[in-house]
Amino acid sequence: MDCKYVLVCETCSSDTGTRVGYGIAVVDRQQVTISAALDLSPDKTAVANLVKKCNRLKISPIHFQDVVDDFLR
């Protein structure tokens, strides 16, 4: 499957206020989201680097959850 990884940004609200969280989405050629992991980190650079690495290594979407789990450890 031909896909790419993209950085996603969302505003998260809680009782203590709002903050920005960054995550990753896996999209196919038609830009349809296959899978996503939202609000992985408030660190845009760290998540953007992970996106770049996933695209460079052409990670299969089958392994997406493993990549996310490893990032969060």
Image: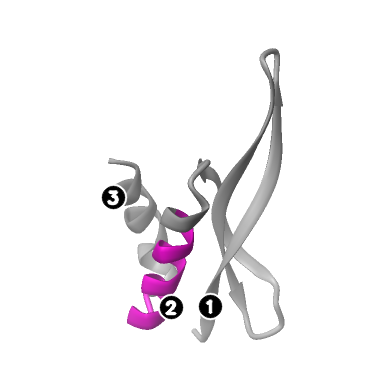
Kindly identify the amino acid type of the residue bearing the numbered disc 2. Asn
Q: Which residue is drawn at 64% across and 85% down?
A: 29
Q: Quadrant of residue 52?
A: bottom left
Q: Mark 1 points at which residue?
A: 4
Kindly identify the amino acid type of the residue bearing the numbered disc 1. Lys
In 3D space, how far apart are the residues under numbered discs 3 and 1 (Cα atoms)? 19 Å
Q: Mark 3 points at which residue?
A: 70
Reply yes or no: does residue 51 show up in magenta: yes
Q: Residue at x 53, y 80 (%)?
A: 3
Specify whether 8 is left or right of 51. right
Q: Which of marks 3 and 2 is nearer the N terminus?
A: 2
Compared to residue 50, the image places residue 52 above or below, namely: below
SS majority, magenta: helix
Disc 2 is placed on an element classified as helix
Q: Mark 2 points at which residue?
A: 55
Q: How crowded is mark 1: few (under 14 residues within 10 Å), some or many (20 or more)?
A: many
Q: Residues within 10 Å of mark 3 (few under 14, many from 20)?
A: few
